[in-house]
Amino acid sequence: MTNINFQAKPQVGFGEAVKSFFGNYANFRGRARRSEFWWVMVFLCILYAVASGIDYAIYGKPGTVYGIVCLATFIPNLAISWRRLHDIGKSGANWFWGIVPVIGLILLIVWYVRDSEPDVNRFGTSPKYQ
């Protein structure tokens, strides 16, 4: 059932995306909008850079702080990646394509930048077109 008259909701902002990221810490069900996913990626880049900077200031190399931040964000990062794949109608297990050097990463990036499926799919209703 395709309806051409879908009206998109406003994009998710930075703060809302980060709040949702930690609020759905281990939620592998449902869907995540493109804006939510990419704002979280920006947040994680900043967080990892700060943690790495702290480690360099203390140890002169990446160490404890960076490791703790990576461990603390691994599951929610995996969860939002799976929900993003759900949003375009793909199984979250497609995340494992990222293990394949270069080609897998390119494939995932292409999928992550695709727009949401407007219709209800097997993973739920579209958060963009509800």
Image (cartoon, rainbow, N blue to C red):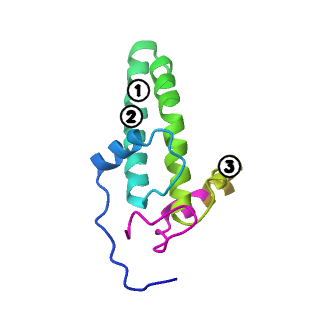
Magenta stretch mostly in which secondary structure? loop
State left or right for residue 116 relative to residue 17.
right
Would you name the residue on which mark 2 appears?
47
Numbered circle sitting on residue 96? 3
Q: Position of residue 40 (x, y in %)?
A: 40, 47
Task: Give SS at disc 2.
Answer: helix
> Is mark 2 in CB contact (under 8 Å) with mark 1?
yes
First in residue order: circle 2 vs circle 3: 2
Residue 72 percent coordinates (x, y): 48, 29
The residue that appears at 33% across and 77% down in the rendered structure is 7
**How many numbered callouts?**
3
Q: Can you tell which of label 2 and label 3 is closer to the viewer?
A: 3
Displayed quadrant of residue 109: bottom right
Range covered by the magenta-colored residues: 108-130
Could you tell me residue 38's position as x and y percent? 41, 53
Q: Who is closer to the viewer here, 97 or 93?
A: 93
